[in-house]
Amino acid sequence: MKAPTVLGKALLIAALAVPFATVAASATPGAPPGPACTRHIAGSGALEQAQPGDVVCVDVAASDRLKITKGGTPDKPLTYSGNGEQVGGIDVEADNVVVDGYTMDGPEAPGIEIHANNVTVQNTTVKAPEGGDGDGVRFFGDNIKILHNTISDTDNSTGAHADCMQTFATDDEDIASKNVDIEDNRCEQIDNMCLMAEGPNSEAGDGSGEGVSEEWTFRNNYCETKEASQAVMIDDVQKLTLEGNTWVAGPDHAIGLQNKSTDAHVKDNKLDPSIDCEVGIDDSSREGYQGPEPKCEP
């Protein structure tokens, strides 16, 4: 068999590379390719076709929000795989769901909103959410995982308080959140806070007074906040671990703990030298606190 010429080798390599280049281009930047679809659905209105354990790909116009109203079971969640697909935002309103690998550029804020239990959102990109309070992600529920996402360019210029991630507990829909795992995310160019968390008895006085916000982990996140006084503000959330995060220049202090945010554990975070105080705390939150000596008010 005759060996290929140099030109022939180049064409062969280029031809073999095409499928791999296509896969790479479709994936969320910095994220691994998503799981392969086992069921393809033409639009959000046909979600009832999906079954527990399916990996679903849904046809959604780039400007439309993906509204997830069908979930799986605790042991067989329903996975929605984007592989980098552009959508106009995501609303999760079903339990036992995994959302993987979507991109949102200029979505209506919040870019992603979760009102459900046993939900994982991972490998997504939310850039420059618009309108409302300008938040990247909002979440409400039990057993929520927010993993390996990039949220960027939130904007306070319209009078918003544009956070990377936010939750509160004010009514039957926006409920207190428990068992929350927020890991390995990047909050880049955030005008307000990387995490704003208010429990049901928040100091703002608008909480429902029902349930508890507790058992949270905020670990290995990159946090860049430009205008707020603190990178993370915790109000009436108990049993929270903040570990291995990177706090970059901007805020007066990295973490604020107030209003009975007890049993917080803070360790191994990287603090930009320009931030004078890592932890600000009030007297009501000191019970069970473990970490560096607080040096300021929350």
Image (tube, rainbow, N blue to C red):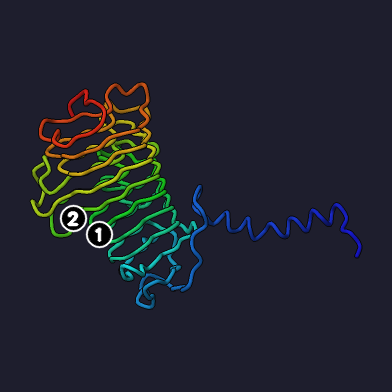
Bin the neighbour count of mark 1 within 10 Å (Cα to Cα): few under 14, some 14-19, many 20 and up: many
Q: Is residue 207 above or below residue 297?
A: below
For residue 171, the mark is: none
Question: At 21% across and 53% down in the image, what residue appears?
Answer: 177
Label 2, secondary structure: give it: loop
Residue 19 placement: quadrant: bottom right
Q: CA distance from mark 1 to mark 2?
A: 7 Å
Label 1, secondary structure: give it: strand
Q: Which residue is mark 1?
A: 115
- Whether residue 117 is visible here, answered yes or no, is yes
| 255 on left or right of 288 | right
Q: For the image shown, how many numbered marks are present on the structure?
A: 2
Bin the neighbour count of mark 2 within 10 Å (Cα to Cα): few under 14, some 14-19, many 20 and up: some
Amino acid type at circle 1 is His
- Who is closer to the viewer here, 67 or 258? 258
* CB contact under 8 Å: marks 1 and 2: yes
Question: At 42% across and 58% down in the image, what residue appears?
Answer: 100
Q: Which residue is mark 2?
A: 174
Residue lying at the far bottom in this picture: please name it: 49
Question: At 22% across and 48% down in the image, what residue appears?
Answer: 215
Q: Position of residue 148 (x, y in %)?
A: 42, 48
Q: Is residue 8 above or below residue 297?
A: below
| 281 on left or right of 20 | left
Q: Position of residue 90 (x, y in %)?
A: 35, 58
Amino acid type at circle 2 is Asp
